Image: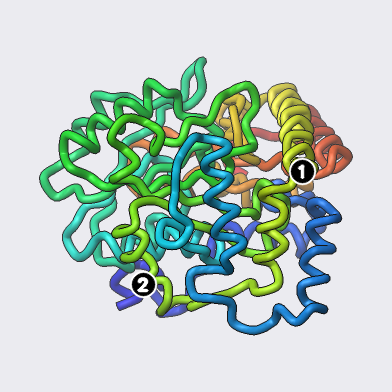
Amino acid sequence: MAAATGLLGTDGQVRPTIFAEMSALANRTGALNLGQGFPDTDGPAQVARAAADAILAGHNQYPPGAGIPALLDAVAAHQRRCYGLELDPADQVLITTGATEAIAAAVMALVGPGDEVLTLEPFYDSYAAVIALAGAVHTTVALVPGPGGFRLDETALRAAVTDRTRLILLNSPHNPTGTVLTRAELTSIAAVAREHDLLVVTDEVYEHLTYGATHVPIATLPAMAERTLTVSSSGKSLSFTGWKIGWISGPATLVTAVRTVKQFLTYVSGAPFQPAVAGALVDPQVAAWVADLAASLSRRRDLLCEGLERAGFTVVVPQGTYFVLADAAPLGFDDGAALCRALPALAGVVGVPASAFTRSGSATDAALASWIRFTFVKQTQVLTDAVERLGRWATTGRAGGAP
């Protein structure tokens, strides 16, 4: 089955993700890794101490299948406090092994062979993989770059929906473009979902990492709470990406369907991390830390974007997430994947090609062929060094054309 989904290479071997490949390249060459989006500093010390205390206190065996009650309550309280969404923690919240598992379990629970799942394009790479594992058909609607960022075309959205579409898998704030969908864009998506009786799974892991834009959960729009499953996690907001504590919330019937699948994936995980995250979600000091993180990331975003522009890239400034997309075409490169594999030797910097987030052969794949994703969730000095290296390469070491 795996070979049929395209998850294996033609030689039958497991194909590593582009993130693993680029990080390995960074390690091998000593290049600065602006490819994989993980912080190079830890999150709040008091949250880390809470996890250590939980280990020493004996929270090391299987937690309850749905998650510990304190974390279920904390997620429900977060959704109420931040967005006015009312959830029963007993049956409308489920704790997962990160957002990736939540999305995988949701897709496998809600669609089957022949059903269509519509995503934005470009898209996070695990979406395509899990849609394939479910035996469903992956369809897309493009986010198109322009002066206002990468934006959604409502006409194209409507054209992408067919009588086989079952689910819209949404992502805002959006990886890899950094787009934060506007209320108007979300209203268009909601209208399509209601008109065609579609379910929505929305990946909102970067919900608190926005820069001058307002994140609007689609579940808050009229008549959408009853057809929407909302996914988030502690990894991005708290800078503990390795803890893999995520959650999914929404209508009880849909959460039950997801739990039915999830129990046969990891079953449970993160026993000592769950109480630590529960405490973090209700701690005003941690909320202030997250706000400071967003402000810091905004400054680091500007540092990277300005450096990339000086080096000759065309940049679309992101409104959220950890990432910026930059076009290498003005530098004479039309193949972003080839440039990414050569860039460690050329400039001592690693990025990820935008083609890792597109369907091979699609219009978006062609349009973004020369684009590269860089992350700014690194220390300021790392970013400063990276843009200096790229600048030197662009002005003194670049010959142009294919690397």
- Could you give the CA–CA distance between mark 2 and mark 1, rounded to whole angstroms? 45 Å
Residue type, label 1: Ala
Determine whether 20 is above or below 213 in the image. below
Q: Nearer the viewer, residue 85 or 18?
A: 85
Compared across the picture, whether 260 is left or right of 354 comes to: left
Compared across the picture, whether 82 is left or right of 181 comes to: right
Whether residue 278 is visible, yes or no, is yes
Residue at 86% across, 39% down: 385
Residue 328, position as x, y percentages in the image: 59, 32
Whether residue 311 is visible, yes or no, is no
How crowded is the residue under tag 2: few (<14 C-alpha within 10 Å), some, or many (20+)? some
Residue at 41% across, 45% down: 202
Residue 324, position as x, y percentages in the image: 62, 34
Q: Are marks 2 and 1 in contact (CB under 8 Å)?
A: no
Q: Quadrant of residue 225?
A: top left
Residue wearing tag 1:
347
Q: Locate the N terminus and report the quarter of the image it occupies.
A: bottom left
Q: Quadrant of residue 310?
A: top right
**Marks 2 and 1: which is nearer the front?**
2
Query: Residue 142: which disc?
Result: none
Residue wearing tag 2:
261
Determine whether 188 is above or below 118 in the image. above
